[in-house]
Image (cartoon, grey):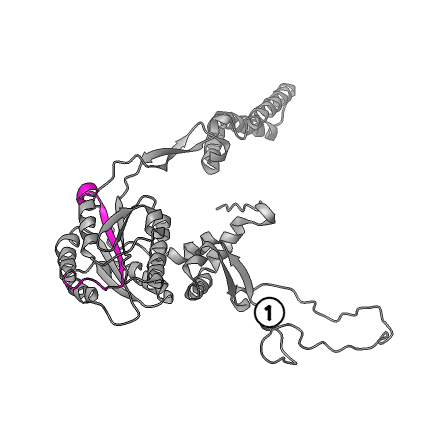
């Protein structure tokens, strides 16, 4: 088995392949470091990477080495303090065993932790790798023309980078065997006959025949050696063709309460949550549509800019957003063709007579249509009336989830709890 190592450097004399190999080898340590870093981050920090520290004891590798062995004598230049023959004690300490904090020690040696910087892409990869949209099923195979490249045997024509070395060498070996076999048979027959003549007492006629046989054997060996080691006919190329790939269709409805009871801090938490969700969807799924709905007493479908930056506000009628979601589903997203998801953020402060209607809409009309619906209530006090109504929805629908967010620090853990990967046993 051959293993090719690409030692070419990328920009700034860095090797991306070596970096990937390092991250793959120390995956668990990097994962733990990312988990710790997430707890102290805000959503605005998502644009940056992360500095990760790995203890030196975790990256040390066993090595084989040869000691000097025996008795050695060295000659070193002296100075004013030492002269030839003086014995110098081995220095103690000086290795640097920590970050500089704590009391200094007069003994012991150590190494600083290995610190490196994760890029933004690498950080997001580790952050999102164990998240997914729950209950994603192939309700409909899209008729889109998305193509994927697959291997399809071997061809006699292609580009040099697609040469299949093993297949080509096997072909060359077979060709050489096939072409040389008749010559090898004739050569063996001549050599056997020559050996028989050499064992007998030969007269002049036999000696001439021996000379002729040796000349013919020499010519045959030259013809066998003249068979090329590899011929263009032997080259085989890996063949790749494009096949249409069926894809799932999914849509995520983002419902955000922007009523007057949602102060700036609560709106900020809601926006951070949806930004995180938006990053996750764009990174994890190639094709997914997002529908943004803002609501106070009236609900409006807006674009991404309007969803995150509009300052419109008013009273609170949550059912308006649920009704608009139903209208959009009916108009554009058939449940037989789409995986439908919903995420709602609110402070839970709703008009009292409207909360029972929200429960009814959600339980009777929306949940049968969607794969998963997540509700987050942003409040630092007790649960509001919308929460109490939604508790009854959760009792009867397994794919309905609800969580409470009190501070910005709760955004990451709540998000991961809502969209963590479910084991096959738990999902069944």
In reply to whether residue 346 is colored magenta, the answer given is yes
Magenta stretch, residue numbers:
329-353
- The reply to whether residue 61 is in sight is no
Residue that carries the numbered disc 1 in the rendered image: 111
Crowding near the residue tagged with mark 1, few <14, some 14–19, many ≥20 C-alpha atoms within 10 Å: few
Q: Quadrant of residue 86?
A: bottom right
Tag 1's secondary structure? loop
In this rendering, is residue 394 above or below 185?
below
Residue at image coords 25%, 36%: 143
Between 391 and 293, the one lying in front of the other is 293
Q: From this viewpoint, which residue is outermost toward the front?
A: 314
Residue 199 coordinates in the image, percent (x, y)? 60, 31
In this rendering, is residue 384 above or below 428?
below
Residue 181 coordinates in the image, percent (x, y)? 48, 28
In this rendering, is residue 256 above or below 180?
below
- The reply to whether residue 408 is in sight is yes
In reply to whether residue 19 is colored magenta, the answer given is no
Residue 239 coordinates in the image, percent (x, y)? 40, 33
């Amino acid at each position: 088995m051959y293993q090719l190592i690409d030692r070419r450097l990328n920009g700034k004399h860095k090797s991306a392949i070596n970096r990937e190999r390092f991250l793959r080898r120390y995956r668990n340590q990097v994962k733990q470091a990312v988990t710790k870093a997430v707890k102290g981050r805000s959503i605005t920090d998502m644009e940056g990477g992360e500095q990760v520290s790995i203890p030196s004891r975790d990256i040390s590798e066993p090595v084989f080495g040869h000691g000097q062995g025996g008795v050695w004598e060295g000659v070193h230049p002296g100075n004013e303090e030492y002269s030839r023959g003086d014995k110098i004690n081995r220095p103690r300490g000086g290795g640097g065993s920590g970050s500089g904090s704590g009391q200094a020690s007069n003994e012991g040696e150590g190494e600083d932790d290995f610190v490196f910087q994760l890029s933004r892409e690498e950080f997001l990869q580790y952050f999102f790798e164990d998240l997914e949209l729950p209950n994603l099923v192939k309700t409909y195979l899209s008729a889109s023309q998305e193509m994927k490249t697959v291997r399809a045997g071997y061809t006699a024509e292609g580009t040099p980078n697609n040469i299949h070395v093993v297949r080509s060498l096997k072909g060359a070996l077979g060709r050489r065997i096939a072409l040389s076999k008749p010559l090898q048979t004739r050569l063996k027959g001549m050599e056997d006959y020559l050996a028989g003549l050499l064992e007998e007492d030969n007269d002049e006629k036999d000696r001439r025949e021996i000379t002729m046989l040796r000349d013919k054997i020499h010519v045959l060996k030259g013809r066998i050696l003249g068979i090329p080691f590899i011929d263009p006919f032997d080259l085989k190329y890996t063949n790749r063709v494009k096949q249409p790939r069926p894809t799932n269709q999914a849509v995520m409805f983002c419902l955000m309460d922007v009523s007057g009871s949602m102060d700036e801090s609560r709106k900020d938490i809601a926006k951070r949550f949806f930004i995180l969700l938006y990053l996750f969807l764009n990174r994890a799924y190639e094709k997914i549509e997002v529908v943004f709905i803002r609501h106070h007493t009236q609900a409006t479908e807006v674009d991404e800019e309007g969803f995150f930056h509009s300052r419109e506000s008013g009273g609170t009628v949550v059912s308006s957003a649920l009704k608009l979601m139903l209208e959009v589903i009916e108009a554009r997203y058939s449940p037989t063709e789409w995986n439908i998801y919903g995420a709602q953020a609110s402070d839970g402060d709703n008009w009292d007579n409207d909360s029972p209607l929200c429960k009814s809409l959600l339980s009777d009309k929306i949940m049968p249509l969607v794969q998963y619906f997540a509700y987050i209530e942003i409040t630092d006090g007790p649960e509001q009336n919308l929460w109490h109504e939604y508790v009854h929805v959760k009792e009867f629908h397994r794919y309905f989830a609800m969580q409470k967010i009190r501070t910005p620090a709760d955004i990451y853990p709540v998000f991961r709890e809502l969209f963590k990967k479910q084991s096959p046993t738990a999902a069944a």
